[in-house]
Amino acid sequence: MKHLLSTRDLDRETAVGILDIAEDMALTADREVRKLPTLRGRTVVNLFFEDSTRTRLSFESAAKRLSADVITFSAKGSSVSKGESLKDTAQTLQAMGADAIVVRHHGSGAAHQLAHAGWIDAHVLNAGDGTHEHPTQALLDAFTMRQRRYGADSRGRDLSGMRVVIVGDIVHSRVARSNVWLLTTLGAEVHLVAPRTLLPAGVETWPVTVHEHLEPALALRPDVVMMLRIQQERMHAAFFPSGREYAREWGLTAERFAALGPDTMVMHPGPMNRGLEISSAAADSSASTVLAQVTNGVFIRMAVLYLLVAGSQEASA
Amino acid sequence: MTGTLIRGASLLGETREDIRIRGGRIAATGRLTPELDERVIDADGLLALPGLVDLHTHLREPGGEASETVLTGTRAAAAGGYTAVFAMANTSPVADTAGVVEQVHALGAQHGYATVRPIGAVTVGLEGERLSEIGAMARSRAQVRVFSDDGKCVHDALLMRRALEYVATFDGVIAQHAQEPRLTEGAQMNEGALSGELGLAGWPAVAEESIVARDVLLAQHTGARLHVCHVSTAGSVDVIRWAKARGIAVTAEVTPHHLLLTEELARGYDARFKVNPPLRRDDDVRALREALADGTIDIVATDHAPHPAEAKECTWAEAAFGMVGLESALPVLQTTMIETGMLGWADLARVMSSAPAEIGRLDGYGDPLTEGAPAHVTLVDPAARRTWSTGDLRGRSRNTPYTGVELAGAIVATVHGGVATVLDGTLVDAEEVARRG
Ligand SMILES: [Zn+2]
């Protein structure tokens, strides 16, 4: 694998392979010395045009545990925000000898362009591009689901037979897109729930079942309910009238949470708006995987960096 | 050399004749013997068309000289077989006064590659608030007859009504860029399954169609002429067909790129394919071709929109809208309309020369190539085939969407007012064109 740009082009075997490597990475976390020498002498650049402390720290931590040299460029206080083109930035990083570039950008397709415009040779890892994709988030979500379901017996398995309900701002969500492609590739049955204003054009062509109301989807006894973050600004653009109405119609309220099955997982990519898309009762319950998602994010990012950078080295050697 | 003799050209692809050009006019046609003071152009196997006329060109000067100038843009036009271009008003300063349109007009005349007819802004600064000095522009030396806020839509219904009425006073026409602004806030590409997948904000067909529908009704109500720029959807075609059937004075244009390319090209996020209105679906392309063939759409206009490399070498959302199109227009039309049998060469001369001249009230262009007519002539080699590249461009910018695409036909020679601007497929030197023009 040269780049990880989207989950749409991952096949089942590759996706399960990444989850399995992440299992190996998770084992190292329990050791006394948690660092692996795998990427010693390699340079991983985190290029963040869009602020995201959580994702940036997760990638930095993953790269450091693999002993890579890590350079971080953040939009604030550097040239990347001041009109320097993506091309110029990319070529600067190339000149610095970057082996892999982890890119987060507010523009959909930015990672794809970095990888394919012919500006650079480095591996490109999409850490979220606009409203397009966020593949490592979907991978860590799948990893978390598989671990909760199968525990130590996870290796080699996909998500066949699992029913996942994703609720909220689908149209603006790169997390939803990446999850739809990945989870269905892994055999899960995916349901989307949102008012029509928050559903993307052409969603009827996606391999999912769409619901406009939450109750019918929850009545299907899903294994996972994933609540997406709602941005308050959306109500000003007439996507929905008010936060209160949104919470009442599409929020995982305490009542709706109480009616879920005992094994249903509650997921959220963070950061959460408590009282809007998710109630504290749900967020703080044992059903919630929010903290596990954060931990697993590091393992998944280690696995992907390993596959891209070390994997290709072995292949070419 | 005081004259030119074009030998053996096929007029509109029909009769084979020689064409003698003297003093800016066609002096004779038929079987002619070369005279001593004549330059002879061997046109065996070539088609002669009336010089092409583009109703929608962005020449960028004044203000956008990094992308194009009147000189570089008219060189691109000549290379594409054009002898007249209508220059859009969205320059800096905006062409909303007699002073600016006269300046642009004069630059065109000075360089000589093509007649430049400025388009005047409908509203001051393209701001959509107050009418610009339409009468002053109409009465200026630039003789403005086409008014447009292109790039922006005249979206205020009252202002549009008044503009239609007022412009009619000067035998002018409003060329509307039909785009409902609220429905297209932040829009990046055609709204559909692909925009949903790519995570790019959609530009829905209804944002164009709702304005076209409103405007044809306003044209009916006022009795004024309306011209719809760059029609891009099957639904707009239906509305225009309906309006024409009711006798409403509406004309419409389609761009070459909307006749050939579809939204699928956005898949790789290559911003060369970002254009406004956006590339649409296969069904739209089919409907546009049919509408051009049956006359619902009157003309082809390039919407030639040059941009510097840095405006395209960025993420899709940050990139500028637009693509260059003067040099490639005729090859795209031959490929999409002639070789599919949907148009003959006489039709092509109508949609690319006489009809745009008529809409723009540009006298002396698009006339049949007969004795006494002004000598605006385009010679085409219909047998040529080439894989398009940026090396085929003659303007200042490189943002063509056709790189790597095989296109039929080539411009071999262009004659503007008796002056050769292109010979043997090569632009004639600027000094020579300016001196002889
Ligand atoms: Zn326009």
Image (cartoon, rainbow, N blue to C red):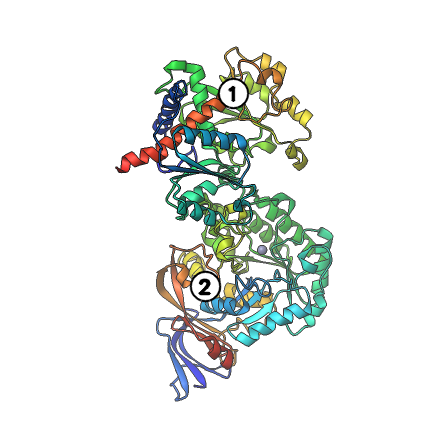
Farthest top residue in view:
A262
* Pointer 1 residue: A291
The correct choice, above or below, for B426 with respect to B325 in the image is below
Left or right relative to A271: residue A304: left
What quarter of the picture does the C terminus of chain A occupy? top left
Q: Is mark 2 within 8 Å of ligand 1?
A: no
Residue B188 x/y as whole percent: 54, 45
Residue A184 visible, this angle? no
The amino acid marked with disc number 2 is Glu
* Pointer 2 residue: B327
Residue A238 is drawn in which quadrant? top right
Farthest front residue in view:
A33
Left or right relative to A284: residue A143: left
Q: Is mark 1 within 8 Å of ligand 1?
A: no
Residue B368 x/y as whole percent: 50, 73
Other residues around mark 2 within 10 Å, as few (<14) / some (14–19) / many (≥20)? many
Residue A56 x/y as whole percent: 50, 33
Residue B261 visible, this angle? yes
